[in-house]
Amino acid sequence: MWKKFKGYFSNDIAIDLGTANTLVYVRDRGIVINEPSVVALKQDSKTVLAVGIEAKKMLGRTPGSIKAIRPMKSGVISDFDVAEQMIRYFIKKAQKNKLRKPRVIIAVPGDITGVEKRAVKESAINAGARDVYLIEEPMAAAIGVDMPVGEPRGNMIVDIGGGTTDVALISLAGIVYAQSVRVGGDAMDEVIAQYMRRMYNLMIGESTAEDIKIRIGSAYPVEQEYEMEVRGRDNVNGLPRTLTITSKEIREALQEPVSQIVDAVRNCLEKSPPELAADLLDRGIVLAGGGSMLTGLDQLISEQTGLLVHRPDSPLEAVAEGAGKVLEDLDVLHNQGLN
Ligand code: ADP
Ligand code: MG
């Protein structure tokens, strides 16, 4: 009986508003939603047709009258109205108890502007939130993977998402240095599509490029190379065509975005105060985000920095887990005046 009541009163929500995926964590229930950050709209009337999984299925497959949009795509909000519709949809879907308005924590990119912050807060209020708090994604990710962020020691987190890679150095529960670069999983997909066009005159869509990356992509030489059959449209005669590619070629194609990610990590290390940088010799670097699952990326970063690199078991969930943990302490934070 008490259990039932517990669920009834605590419907506070934490949202990881990612460029590729949105996750929603409900207090006492954990992550209840994990869907692509995609909205499908009617071109003329802007009516929302689908959000999340259903909308992603339409990406690249829409007729002229329908548009599938990723409102958070490049780490900035490209379309406020669409972003608001998406936030509203996810909050509604996560809520069991519709009588009491939830308090909401939203994890946002570290370099989001003041205008965007206000827009995100307003969207959540419009979508039915009672209070809205924002937390920076790298901080949420670090809490999510259990880094001891409160200690006076250097903790480095590298969150490789769809649109951006965020590198942050954290000590005493604050961000000492952070950098966000517009390179992540999407850029990897793009270079794979470009490669297929340049080498084979084969046009492929973003979903196919992502599939290639996930199945045979790598950042570091692998013990066994793989092959994969790819389907697309021949650019010369316009007909559908199948061909076989190897993991070695894809690794070469991925070199540019992968080295930009490594450079961002090295750059953050160079900007770190010496004492905190020295701490990393013991603790290493922790990765988060779906892009960190690229085979061998951990090995490459380790080789290029000389530091240990850890990848958690569920890097895609780190931000939502971290924001969710903060949610459990919301009453404390509220008194501390978290924005
Ligand atoms: P965001 O926080 O920006 O929404 P996510 O952390 O959800 O991003 O990561 C999404 C990215 O991770 C996508 O580009 C996706 O293709 C990529 N990804 C997911 N799984 C893998 C995998 N096994 N290997 C490589 N990339 C992956
Ligand atoms: Mg993310």
Image (tube, rainbow, N blue to C red):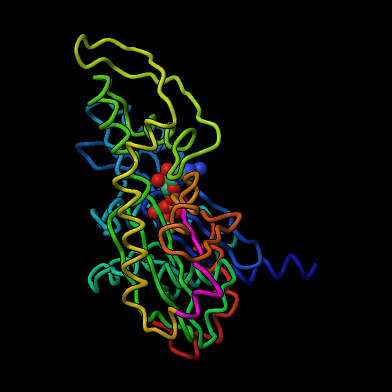
Count of numbered tags: 0
The quarter of the rendered structure image containing the C terminus is: bottom left
157 or 124, nearer to the observer: 157
Quadrant containing ligand 2 reads bottom left
Query: In this orientation, does residue 130 appear?
Result: yes
Q: Residue at x 30, y 28 (%)?
A: 62
The image quarter containing residue 261 is bottom left
The quarter of the rendered structure image containing the N terminus is: bottom right
293 or 35, nearer to the observer: 293
Q: Which residue occupies the extreme right position in the image? A: 1
Check if residue 281 falls in the magenta segment. yes
Give the residues in magenta.
278-290
Q: Give the image location of residue 36, x and y in percent.
A: 43, 45
Q: Give the image location of residue 125, x and y in percent.
A: 38, 68
Q: Give the image location of residue 283, x and y in percent.
A: 55, 73
Check if residue 106 falls in the magenta segment. no
Q: Residue at x 36, y 79 (%)?
A: 272
Q: Residue at x 51, y 58 (%)?
A: 24
Q: Residue at x 58, y 54 (%)?
A: 314
Q: Give the image location of residue 214, x and y in percent.
A: 47, 37
